[in-house]
Image (cartoon, rainbow, N blue to C red):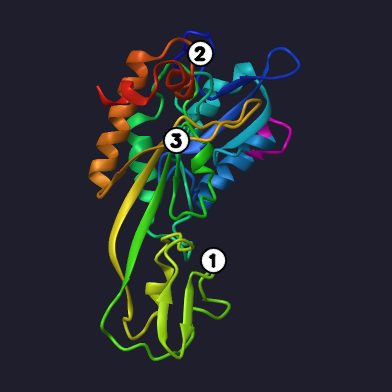
Amino acid sequence: MSPDRYGDTAGVVPGRPEGRAVLRIRALEPYSSEFTSEQIGVIADIAEKYGSGIVHVTPRQTVEVPDIDNSSIGKIAELLGACGLSLGSTGRHMRNVIACSRWCLYNAVPVSDLARKLNSLHAGRVLPGKMDISLSGCDFSCVRSRTSDIGVIARADIELTDKECKKCSLCVKAPLGCQVDAINLSDGGLTIDRDRCVRCGFCSNICRPGTIEVRSRSFDVYVGGCGGIRPREAVFHKSLDSEEALVDELGRILDRYAEHGWEGARIGDVIEKKGTSFLEG
């Protein structure tokens, strides 16, 4: 547990009354936003023994345990570490990288393992200001990738093949049909409205004849968004065609932000002052 320049300890939020704290907990194993039943039991035991018996789930997919006496934090950290849990992030420590659930039907690309990798690489990193990274498996963006400091949206570009459509209508009728009505099935055949399509690729999963197939998969990267008192939408940065390229690019963005940012500035503040050109150095 190392303090940052503001003097706070990663994962420990000062509580009330004085001398008590709120602990922010995350799982680095099996994955940052998934907990095993054993880990849930440990968190419950900690809340009962050291807190007030309640926990809170945060928007960043971590768990907070309130009403902890400061003198117990060291012991609790040991208990957490023994089962793959750790204290989370506060202040200028990089926040938990969050992702869509791995079992969502609409994942163009499952991104939970990618979040695990990014957390393993960057957990605990101290940056100029708060840093959120959100990974969306499709354009529905359930984890708010367009209002995060760095947001990633997975894409699946589809194409129509020469395989004959059987007009089964699974791709257009509930409950499996296109959620944005981008597919039209008529006597003239199957057509796709590219303006409506959000490139989730789900239609290719249910098309048994193979009339609809995924041509390519990619990741769109957005930077500079935030929520809070001054919400701001992120701007498109670039598209990448592999997970390896994405991991490298996100690491490079963090490095550029660390180099050009000033204390307390979020990456969107740096973009407002310098434009996005500093990301290309």
Which residue is labeled 1 in the image? Answer: 180
Three-letter code, disc 2? Gly
**Residue at label 2?**
264
Q: Quadrant of residue 274?
A: top left
Q: Which residues are magenta?
A: 49-57
Which one is in front in this view, the residue at disc 3 or the one at disc 2?
3
Using the rendered view, name the quadrant where residue 157 is placed.
bottom left
Q: Residue 99 placed where, x, y %?
A: 46, 47
Q: Which residue is mark 3?
A: 235
Q: Earlier in the sequence, mark 1 or mark 3?
A: 1
Residue 52 on the magenta span: yes
**Taking the image as drawn, is residue 48 in sight?**
yes
Which circle's residue, 1 or 2, is located before the other in the chain? 1
Gap in angstroms between the C-alphas marked 1 and 3: 23 Å
Q: Residues within 10 Å of mark 3 (few under 14, many from 20)?
A: some
Other residues around mark 1 within 10 Å, as few (<14) / some (14–19) / many (≥20): few
User: Where residue 38 appears, x then y in whole percent?
Assistant: 51, 49
Which of labels 1 and 2 is toward the front? 1
